[in-house]
Image (cartoon, rainbow, N blue to C red):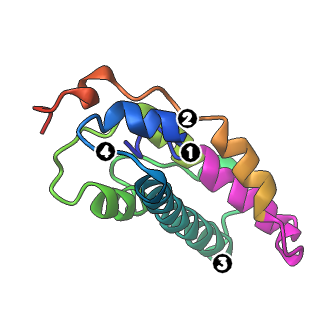
Amino acid sequence: MFFYTRYPSSNVLKTFFPDVKFNRCITSQLIKWFSNFREFYYIQMEKFARQAIVDGVSDVKDLAVTRDSELFRALNMHYNKANDFQVPDRFLEVAEITLHEFYNAISLNKDTDPSWKKAIYKVICKLDSDVPEEFKSPSYL
């Protein structure tokens, strides 16, 4: 699911987990899991953006996220260990946009502000995609 939506609402979660009896605690736990997924995602983005700057990348256009890139491999290994899912192309696009946002912010020294990442989060949360309907099927995996 994370390949499609980084910020699912509780209603989206309830739709795609019909076998779960939701209560406040379970809903909170699922939302917390996605928060942890996002945290790993953003940590990787910042790490790779900083490394690109150290490596002398001077133009954000030189940063790409492809299926062969080290960043993609790190994310895929974390979210899709068994390679059960074909990662959608849109995820690669969003990952590249995220990497560019981090690179630009760090390059402009915006990371000196304690809340510098909030602007990036606002951009990325708008890039969520619909989760495919087949995810609702109890036999999907």
- The residue indicated by pointer 4 is 21
The answer to which quarter of the image holds residue 113 is bottom right
The amino acid type of the residue labelled 4 equals: Lys
Numbered mark located on residue 128 in the image: 2
Tell me the kind of residue under disc 3: Val
Q: Main secondary structure of the magenta part?
A: helix
Instruction: Give the CA distance from mark 2 to mark 1.
Output: 7 Å
Q: Where is residue 28 in the image (x, y as percent from the top left)?
A: 50, 58
Q: Which of marks 3 and 1 is nearer the N terminus?
A: 1
99 or 19, nearer to the observer: 19
Q: Give the range drawn in magenta.
A: 97-116
Q: Residue 73: x and y, percent? A: 33, 60
Tag count: 4
Asked if the residue at tag 1 contacts the one at tag 2, i.e. Cβ–Cβ closer than 8 Å, the answer is: yes
Say whether disc 3 or disc 2 marks the residue closer to the N-terminus: 3
Vertical arrangement, residue 10 with respect to residue 99, above or below: above
Q: Decide whether residue 109 is among the magenta residues.
A: yes
